[in-house]
Image (spheres, coloured by chain):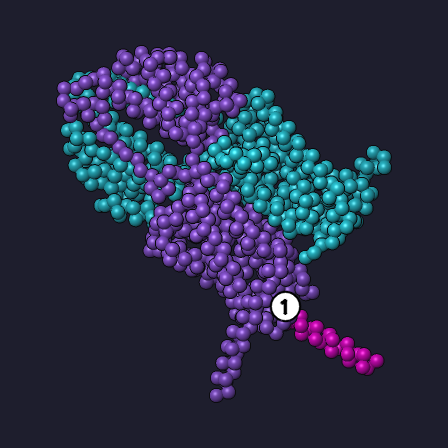
Chain colours: A purple, B cyan
Amino acid sequence: MKREHRLIDKIKQGIQDTFYIWIEELKHVFRDSGVMIFFFLVPLAYPVLYALIYNPEVVREAKLVVVDQSDTYLSREFIRRVNATADVEVVGVMADMEEAKRMLDEKKAYGILAFPPEFSQEMHAGRQARVSLYSDMSSLLFYKAFLLSATEVSLDLGREWTAHNHPQSTEELQRITVDPIPYEAITMFNTQSGFASFLVPAILVLVIQQTLILGICMLGGTAREKSRFRSLVPLNRHYEGTLRIVLGKALTYIVLYGIVCVWIFAIVPRLFGLPQVGHPWTVLLFLLPYLLACIFLSMTLSGFMVSRESPMLIFVFTSVILLFLSGVSWPKEMIPPFWQAVGYIFPSTPAVQGFVRINTAGATLSEVTHEYQVLWLQTGIYFLTACIIYRYQIIRSRVISHRLHKHVKNRTKAVSLG
Amino acid sequence: MTFKQWIEAVGDVARREVKRLLNKPLYLFCMLLAPAISVVFLLSLMQEGLPTDLPIAVVDLDNSATSRNLIRQLNAFEQTEVVMTTASFTEARTEMQKGHVYGIFHIPADFSVEATTGKQPTLSFYTNGTYLIAASLLFRDMKTMSVLAGASVGLQTGTAKGLTTEQIMGQLQPIVVDTHAIGNPWLNYSVYLNNSLLPGILQLMIFLITVYSIGTEIKFSTSREWLRTGRNSFSASLLGKLLPQTVVFTVVGMAMLAVLYGFNAFPLNSGWGPMVGAMFLLVLASQAVGVFMIGVLPTLRLGLSFASLFGMLAFSVVGFSFPVQAMYPSVQALAKLFPLRHYFLIYIDQALNGRDLIFSWSHYVWLAAFLILPVLISKNLKEALLNFKYVP
């Protein structure tokens, strides 16, 4: 009977302490302008900045210079059609390659299209005519724009040329001669191959993890710095249970990041017309273990931070590495096994993969099962490590307070004796 | 103070700084370890240059010798690997959403019969635009395959009519585009990205360390002692402090160049001189920007936040993936404020294209011009060093 009573009391006390710690942690966050930067300013401003940088999505009117040594109806028609495409703009027609190269040197153009003198003759003789395309490699997107436009024009013009010169007796023969097997290319999900639609969703997910790590580690470093005994846990009777501390603090972060997530995943994509085809519930269910895993990972890491600022020096550069590990730009199949293993340490790796497929490609939870399971597994592991860290810190602060108590007692004894 | 005394003051502060650098493992991590990790990571990640054997699914509704032959040929392409054939398009699409394949090649029913009887069956191929790099590489392979499929049918019917291969190709594809990627003919992604990513990481770490090393003096109220070591000359104190860092970062920068152009033999059409000069100026310019940051925001955490945000933004705004020319005009103007942007443009002109120095001199001047920043902010920074109270 008595035992039971004690247990209920203990649970009650535990819940009260959890809420006490929650409120205390909230106060810490709002009092600390450094943490506020990472919890609010960065998540609010960064998505907008990135969306603004990449919002033009595609390269339009890439500058191309032409060297037309053929100077015939056919070459001029080719040039006219290339210029008419949305991706390429012909900025000039030069007499020789030297002049065209100078245009590239002066960045007045980023590609050269060169027609040899015999271009027209070859075509009239029924042979394949060649046209050379040179592209500056400062951006692959220029290369892609030139290549796609020039190829499209060459195929269209070629088809019309054959149809015109080789009229066939029957329609059937005509089709075989001109275009026996037509084809169509379809880009799915990110239909215009937009750069913002490709990269920004991945960045949004990464921003969550990185700001949580920076903010929570900063809170930990500050607590350590302020404490007389470099302890993460204050000498306070409310901070005596591991679970209370871990859950109370986690509650703070999850409430704050709930708001941040609405901005990042619901409002920003709408403002900038980014892809958003995932079902809201799927997104929500998927983000939950991601947030928890990030929070517990950050709480674990915060145990190792002894100063306020060291997290920024240590973690900021990892964003570049983590973005590549997520497998959105560099295909995940091509990541060496060692780095794949490293990738599994961080929640961002499965989260970016899964989120991008849900958000951009409309996958459901069953299609991201692997990633979803990994995230829950990480949540479990990092919850345990966070508990271990705090348990250690509680014991440490108890030992300190015990010593302190003894020290004071001894002193009073000495005084009374003296 | 005579010039000799000034030099001595610089030396004293530099000696003090070397001790400080050696005393904190954090410096070792940020100045040497972080750049080293990044170099090893990025270069080993993109070792292959181009992704190979990207998985695709084939939907083969024809299931004939012709279609199977087509699949075999497609599989032989370097970038493509057919990992599955599915019975329906829906199934293939689900595999794509599961992340198992990046592309789908669709062969319609009765393909082989229709192709030879002039019914023009259409081959369709789908790429997952969510993964831009994988999608564009697979697009290339699947398009080539489709063109070749058409050509092989054309060749069959043409040969039957007694035409030569030359004549047939002249009809099937009268115009051929020969493509030349100047400087990077292999379209090597490691060349394409790491030439700018690695200096970008260096720039970021220089921002952070410059801000940190000055900011901690303010935070722990050692700035007066620092200035005393510099015999109360602000210029001697600042120079003495930054000099050891300049040496370390220059060594790291040169090591990066050695790895890129020596060990990996990436294109270096300009010779070493222009790139060594650019790297050295990048180090100096980044330090100058760092001094400016802590001068404007003399609170350590705010200064560091500024450095982190600005340093990370550089990777996007410098435009080595999405070109600056395609960004909004205001973002284009912003890009000029990053030393890395000018380094990147020098790299394009010099190492990649081997152009005359005349075309890049303005960017060397830009990099050097960043050195004015510490002078501009000196009054503010001096004030902060003497009187700033750190508020935690």
Residue at x 59% of width, y 71% of height: A239
Location of residue A97 with respect to A397 vertically, above or below? above
Name the residue nearer the viewer: A220 or B186.
Answer: A220
Residue at x 34% of width, y 54% of height: A364
Residue A206 placed where, x, y %?
49, 50
Q: Is the magenta stretch mostly helix, strand or loop?
A: helix
Q: Is residue B317 left or right of residue A34?
A: left
Location of residue A115 with respect to A376 vertically, above or below? above
Location of residue A87 with respect to B305 vertically, above or below? above
Residue A32 placed where, x, y %?
62, 58
Name the residue nearer the viewer: A152 or A128.
Answer: A152
Instruction: Point out the image quarter for the N terminus of chain B.
Output: top right
Q: Mark 1 lies on which chain?
A: A
Location of residue B133 with respect to A3 vertically, above or below? above
Residue at x 83% of width, y 34% of height: B3
Instruction: Point out the image quarter for the C terminus of chain B.
Output: bottom right
Residue at x 58% of width, y 42% of height: B311
Q: Quadrant location of residue B115?
A: top left
SS at circle 1: loop
Name the residue nearer the viewer: A404 or B177.
Answer: B177
The amino acid pointed to by label 1 is: Pro
- Queried whether the magenta region covers residue B270, the answer comes back as no
Q: Quadrant location of residue B349?
A: top right
Name the residue nearer the viewer: A403 or A302.
Answer: A302
Residue at image mark 1: A234
Per the rendered image, the range of residues in magenta is A398-418
Residue A313 placed where, x, y %?
61, 49
- Queried whether the magenta region covers residue A412, the answer comes back as yes
